[in-house]
Image: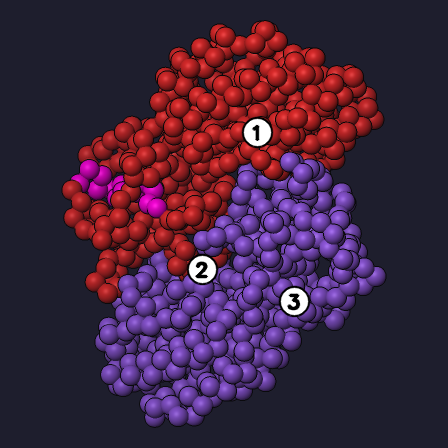
Chain colours: A purple, B red
């Protein structure tokens, strides 16, 4: 029985029957890159996403959570059009600095920061989003020993989370941030220790497609930031409202209504408590900025029948695109949008299963999907590969060759 | 509520209150390796597994499926005590050759072999386990063009699978191998093309703990090999019976009864059809040989409370040990056996959650497990990390530093 797949982003069009990415044919891109498997990222799509954000969320800072995609040519051009880069390790911090970001525009979140990481961040002048009181004391001690004034924000574990969020990052006992009720004391501790207190980081979930759920979380976040500031007796310079903007991966999912979220946020900010009057606000996005801009191209190496079912075996697989195989946090495997890139727009003719080249039944990129008939040599495109793709996959698994990456749409 | 965890393999004992691996204290190993996170593999445990196999399965060849663990110092010593190495990519083939294996003792399975991979294997003299008729024709063509006689075995997609198998690799429409009913014609084709036909590779599942299910599958495999040989009119030089021997990961699971499987297999082979009289038989094992011999050591960087629950945050995580986080083929996350290595054998005092350093709620190594009270600096051990550990994990995810690896128990 044919299984549904998610929608192919509307930006992708055919050029002479071949999928075009950034206005260029997939087959030509693969040839230029030197083969497949290949990730192609279209910067033009990212730029349009940023513009869309800018026009809706006037006055709100836009941060890029680089964990979504750290491919350095892409990072360099994104850095120029956002207000800050959020990183989750010392390695990402160095990637952000190498991409040209000012240390003052980088913030570093993540549980389990080692002393060496805290020291590197403090020396570089990067803002640390503190995940616990213990981490705060370690950071203060390191700053004291190094004779530096550390830039420190507090990550808050809120008592709420985005309803229907793809990943729950707040609400109840969590490894992230400091429980809200203990935050005011920590703010006072930082201010008394003469740290450069940068404000709050409040992240209530991710991959949300329901505007009302996001609106509710953003309103609760502003109220929480104000209440914590009141109780601390200090106004936060910046409130990072988190992100959580999702993209539709699967059949039946619809894009988030950004205009609605923005309108509500402006209303909430206009009515915000006085203590936040001079605070800046930021939204931190990863997946929403880059997820749809990436396409994973992999070539059909074998076409075979088993018990009457056609299987298309490709030269890539879950070692490059783990999430599309259904093994990255999903409970039930569902189909990402996939297509035959070299027969793009052709009428679907057969129900086929696309499997990767790994010798494991987990390596499935498209399960019982309707496709034009494809042959050996055709290119398969797996969409929504721009975020949590290659870097979030077990690249060394089974010793296959690495994937290539390529940036298009930079106008050069 | 405390959640159960799997059993710690009985080989691991305390030395002065610290977990010993290969007779050496975990803290000393971490110091010698240069820190954490660190995988330690105990070759002595692997050697004992091989001996256990040898004494039970007399006359059966033992192959190591290197995809389970390709750490080169380990591979080199395993190579010396098994009869063959099974590989799943050209990269693994080169690793097997570099470990000292003879090409004649290497077989290469896996869907999606490219022409370049087929050529490399044929040039090296490695046996190819053919996954489809198309692949067979490509291999024959390449051998002809290179003036070589290719070593070719046929991977069969059997009509059965191991009941209760952790991963289903046979039965119904599958991407692996050639459907049984088409195999005799392919055998004849290979023989007529004057290839060096090596026999059958029949893999019906993996991670089985039920001896009766394995026995049933092995008996069916022998019957199938005989029936295919009869219909082809050619006796297979070798029948690779697959593997499928599981190890207990989770609470309530019990080790496979090897003696029972072996006794039944000897009985089945003694009564085998005449056409298989001169055939050799092999069992191909990965996880069962190395899985329990590996321990992942990671250091506690932060200890924090959230809503009354203690969280131990470590310097490692799912980027090194994806399976233990529940994100590698599992439907529901369950706890691998974990312990505080530096307080090994101490009485459990508190229910804690062990999380990795990644900024994602997926990064969980132990969920509500009873442990001795641990502090920053203590080492956490995650057991059953010898197979599908580091190489099956998204090591680049979030840009943390790589894990270290170390081999002990080689008697040097």
For the residues bearing labels 1 and 2, Cβ distance under 8 angstroms:
no
Chain hosting mark 3:
A
Chain hosting mark 1:
B
Q: Which residue is mark 1?
A: B159
> Is B15 colored magenta in this rendering?
no
x and y, in percent, of residue A320 in the image: 59, 49
Q: Which mark is residue A9?
A: 3
Direction from residue B230 to residue B293 in the image, left or right: left
Closer to the camera, A252 or B12? A252
Chain hosting mark 2:
A
Badge 1 and badge 2 both on one subunit: no
Closer to the camera, B51 or B74? B51
- Quarter occupied by the C terminus of chain B: top left
Query: Who's the residue at 60% across and 57% down the image?
Result: A4
Judge depth for marks 3 and 2 and give the one in front: 3
Task: Report the magenta residues as a range.
Answer: B334-346
Query: Who's the residue at 50% across and 8% down the image?
Result: B271
């Amino acid at each position: 029985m044919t299984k549904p797949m998610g929608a192919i982003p509307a930006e992708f069009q055919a050029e002479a029957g071949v999928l075009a990415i950034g206005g260029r044919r997939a087959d030509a891109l693969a040839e230029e890159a030197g083969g497949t498997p290949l990730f192609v990222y279209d910067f033009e799509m990212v730029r349009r996403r940023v513009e869309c954000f800018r026009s809706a969320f006037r006055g709100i800072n836009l941060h890029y959570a680089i964990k979504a995609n750290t491919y350095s040519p892409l990072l360099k051009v994104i850095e120029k059009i956002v207000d800050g880069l959020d990183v989750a390790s010392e390695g990402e911090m160095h990637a952000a600095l190498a991409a040209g970001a000012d240390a003052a525009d980088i913030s570093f979140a993540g549980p389990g920061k080692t002393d060496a990481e805290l020291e590197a961040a403090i020396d570089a002048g990067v803002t640390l989003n503190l995940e616990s009181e213990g981490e705060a004391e370690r950071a203060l001690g390191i700053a004291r020993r190094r004779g530096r004034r550390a830039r420190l924000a507090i990550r808050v574990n809120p008592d709420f989370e985005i309803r229907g969020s793809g990943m729950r990052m707040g609400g109840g006992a969590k490894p992230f941030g400091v429980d809200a009720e203990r935050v005011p004391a920590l703010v006072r501790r930082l201010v008394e220790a003469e740290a450069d207190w940068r404000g709050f980081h409040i992240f209530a979930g991710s991959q949300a497609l329901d505007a009302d759920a996001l609106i509710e979380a953003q309103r609760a976040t502003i109220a929480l930031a104000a209440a914590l500031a009141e109780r601390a007796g200090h106004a936060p310079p910046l409130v990072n409202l988190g992100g959580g903007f999702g993209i539709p991966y699967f059949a039946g999912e619809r894009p988030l209504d950004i205009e609605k979220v923005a309108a509500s946020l402006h209303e909430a900010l206009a009515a915000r408590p006085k203590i936040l009057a001079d605070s800046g606000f930021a939204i931190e996005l990863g997946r929403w900025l880059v997820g749809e801009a990436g396409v994973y191209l992999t070539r059909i190496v074998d076409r075979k029948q088993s018990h009457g079912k056609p299987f298309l075996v490709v030269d890539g697989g879950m070692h490059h695109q783990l999430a599309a195989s259904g093994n990255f946090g999903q409970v039930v495997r569902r189909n990402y949008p996939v297509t035959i890139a070299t027969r793009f727009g052709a009428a679907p003719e057969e129900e086929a299963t696309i499997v990767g080249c790994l010798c494991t039944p987990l390596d499935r990129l498209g399960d019982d999907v309707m496709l034009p008939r494809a042959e050996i040599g055709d290119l398969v495109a797996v969409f929504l590969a721009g975020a949590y793709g290659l870097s979030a996959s077990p690249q060394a698994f089974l010793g296959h060759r690495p994937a290539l990456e390529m940036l298009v749409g930079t106008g050069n």
